[in-house]
Every structure is written in C-alpha cells, then in structure tokens.
Image: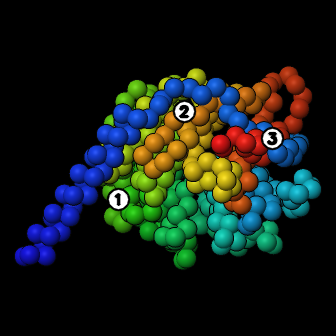
Amino acid sequence: MRMAGTNRIESSTVRLLRSLCWLIAFVCCSGAAAGTLPLQVAKRIEIAGADPVQAIASGPGGLQVYVASEREIRVYDVASGRLAGTLPLPSPVVDMTVDASGGVGYAALTAPARVVVFGLQPLRIRSTMALTDGTPSTLLLDAAAHALYVESSASGSLARFDTSSGKRVAALRLDGTLQQMATDGRGTLYVANMNHNAIDTVDTARMIRTSAIPLQDCTQPVGLAMDPVGRRLFVACRDGDRAVVDTDMGFTFESLHGEVPGVVRTVFGFHPFGAGGWKGGAFSAGKGLQLTAIRMNAFINYSAAGSYPLHGTCQALALDSAGHGLWLAVAQSSGSGAPVQLWLLGETAGASK
C-alpha cells in the first residue's frame, strides 16, 4: 500500500510539473510570423517524367533518395544527381515509406490493393502484402514496434501489419475524412480527421479509437507529425493555421497562424540541419507554393519560423536521413514546361545563431 501511495504522489507531481511547463510555454512562446525561412537549395535534381510524385524518402546515410511515382520507384545518387536504379511496380503507387537503417521500403499500390515490400540495396521486390480494408492512401512505419499502418481514406479504415511476418494484425474503421497519421512510439496512433476538426487517437495494441483531441483555430487538419520525446503533436490545417498539441494533456497549447493554405504533409525532426542547427523543426507544404515551419527552441518553446517560396506545388517532402536538410518534390507552376525537381533544402550559414 505504501508503494501504491508513493506512485500516486509521484504521478501527481509529474502532472503538476507538466502543467507548469505548459503555462511557462504559453506565456513565453511567440507565435508571430518570422518572415522568410533562412534556407537555401543545397541540391537540385530534375526527375523528368515523374509527375506526380507520390512520396520521397532518404536512404541509408543520406547517400540516395527514393522517389515513388506512377508505376515505379526510382533511386537517385545524391552526390551526382544521377538515376541509380528503377524498380517497376505492377500497379500505381499512392505512398511509400522507408526504413533506412533496416534497408527496406514499403509501397502502397492500387488495383489490386497491396503493399509491396522492397529492398533498398539492391533495389528489388521482396514480398507483397494483400490489403482487404479498402484502397490505400497513406502509410506510416513504426520500425521499432515492427508495425506498418495502412490507411484508406476512401473507406475510413486503418490496418496494422506486423513487418516481421507480413501478416495483418488488426484493423478498425473511423468516421470521417482521414489524413496524415503519426505515432508516439508508446502505443498511441494519431490520425488527422477533417470531418470534425480533431485528432483521433487509437490504441495500437487493441486497434480501437480511444478519444479525439479537439483543435483550436485550426480548421480541417491534414498534416501531422510527432515529437516522440517531448510528446508534442504538430498539426497543419487546410486553412493555413497550425497547432502544437500536448498529447499528455490532450489539448492545443500553441496556435500559430499562417499564410500557407492547402498543406498536405508535415514532417518533424530533431536537428534537421545538423548538430549546429535547430534543436528541432516541423515542416509543412502542399499546394500553397510555400514551405512553412515551426521551430523548436526548447522542449516547451516553439515559434513560427516563417515560410520559404517554392514557385510551385510541393508534391512530397521528407527529412534527409543524415540530417543535411529537407527533401521536397517541387512541381513548377503550370505552363513553365519544367519537370518535377527534387530539392534538398539546407540552412544558410549563420542562420541558427
């Protein structure tokens, strides 16, 4: 009994400390726009004939970048910018994710619905997993938990697969228009739901919906990314506004207004520009012709970092696995005749100071 009482006291103390941290962050954080992001294009690769790009991913050590488009996956050598290999696919690809450390990738295909498991080096198909829960729209990999989550926006379904066996573990249906997913690595999956302007939470062990986190000043959430250490959820909404959610307390503690509507994807990473750069950053882009970012100044301090002009729509984005920056697939404005380009955006010299 004494041990249980001690645990309850410690739990209350932890909750109190988190509440105090939230209060400090609420008072101290600045949500003002910060102008143009201090970024520059460190690498540019033209990928003719790959429009639209459905997903991009950085390979082991950041030496290669993988591009999913139409009925194939291409791999480009980052140093030379040259095409290093092509993997034909049996049907159109809608999303792709890569486990760079594990040397394996996953591509969601349609007609018929399936997931193709492929090796990165050499680039070849290893196996396939049949999908029975609707046409896939989004993939999310939790490599540490050996879990692959497959979302079908059309049917409002989520399915979990065991990546070790390739077997479907469980599935559930959610009411609404489902968008990007994120996981905290502790047994909770978060799903952006446009229909009720909230983030659905899912217990991944039982694959059941447990609650919904309401959003403030953020209409139709689409982009979602997780800081698994600070337990912060970064949300980008179709109206251009963004939110930082405390997942422990279950509500928005920071609302950041923006001018970049039409976001489709959000990514988060620690030290995205190397050890001497930002502590962390959440980046969002889509049809708004700009990239926008939230900078993590500390675990309880975030600010709007500004935007970066793309002069075209961002079809996909991903963090470089070596921490060199952010990869984007940028489609130039209609009528320009230019192919889709891969951009590696890095921080300008002295920008982190």
In the picture provided, is 307 more to the left or to the right than 33?
A: right
Give the residue pinned by disc 3: 41
Percent x, y of residue 99:
64, 66
- Say which element carries label 2: strand
Q: Residue at x 75, y 31 (%)?
A: 310
Residue 241, above or below 327: above
Q: Pick the residue in front: 117 or 9.
A: 9
Which image quadrant for residue 166? bottom right
Q: Quadrant of residue 88?
A: bottom right
Residue at point 80%, 62% (across, down): 63
Between marks 1 and 2, how big is the CA–CA gap? 31 Å
Mark 1 vs mark 3: which is more N-terminal? 3
Q: Which residue is mark 2?
A: 304
**Residue type beneath disc 1:** Asp
Give the CA separation, mark 3 to mark 2: 21 Å
Between the residue at mark 1 and the residue at mark 3, the CA separation in whole angstroms equals 40 Å
Q: In the visual, does 49 lie left or right of 220?
A: right
Q: Residues within 10 Å of mark 1 (few under 14, many from 20)?
A: some
Q: Is residue 283 visible?
A: yes
